[in-house]
């Protein structure tokens, strides 16, 4: 009985990990860009405010991630 419960728990966690992969796409909407970061830059920010807080005090700025911007545009054409 204990082994069945363990197998079910592992299977559920494995299946749940597939559902969380879509949230990773939402995490990289904005990129920190500048001389140090290049283009597209450090693209790990979910919000513009997060990106600007990281850029504060540096010679960097924030822009939308090109992968996110162009992915939304191409979905309508297929």
Image (tube, rainbow, N blue to C red):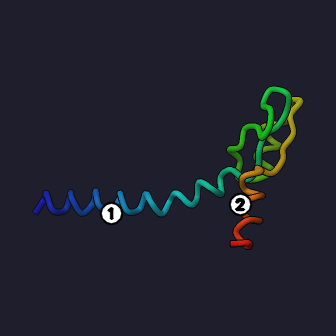
Q: Is residue 66 above or below residue 36?
A: below
Residue furthest to the top: 36
Residue 15 in which image quadrant: bottom left
Distance from disc 1 to disc 2, alpha carbons, whole Å, reads 30 Å
Residue furthest to the right: 59
Q: Is residue 34 above or below residue 51?
A: above
Q: Is residue 37 left or right of residue 6?
A: right
Q: Are marks 1 and 2 in contact (CB under 8 Å)?
A: no
Looking at the rendered image, the quarter that the C terminus falls into is bottom right
In the rendered image, residue 30, in percent from the top left (x then y), is placed at 76, 49
Q: Which mark is residue 40?
A: none
Q: Nearer the viewer, residue 8 or 57?
A: 8
Residue 31 in which image quadrant: top right
Q: Residues within 10 Å of mark 2 (few under 14, many from 20)?
A: few
Q: Nearer the viewer, residue 37 or 4?
A: 37
Q: Is residue 9 left or right of residue 31?
A: left
Task: Name the residue located 28 percent from the left edge and 56 percent from the top edge.
Answer: 10
Q: Which residue is mark 2?
A: 71
Circle 1 SS class: helix
Q: Which mark is residue 12?
A: 1
Task: Name the residue located 72 percent from the left edge and 38 percent from the top edge.
Answer: 42
Circle count = 2
């Amino acid at each position: 009985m204990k082994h069945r419960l363990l197998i079910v728990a592992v299977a559920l966690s494995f299946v749940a990990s597939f559902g969380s992969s879509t949230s990773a796409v939402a995490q990289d909407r904005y990129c920190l860009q500048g001389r140090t970061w290049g283009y597209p830059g450090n693209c790990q920010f979910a919000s513009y405010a997060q990106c600007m807080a990281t850029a504060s005090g540096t010679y960097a700025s924030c822009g939308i991630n090109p992968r996110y911007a162009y992915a939304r545009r191409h979905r309508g054409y297929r």
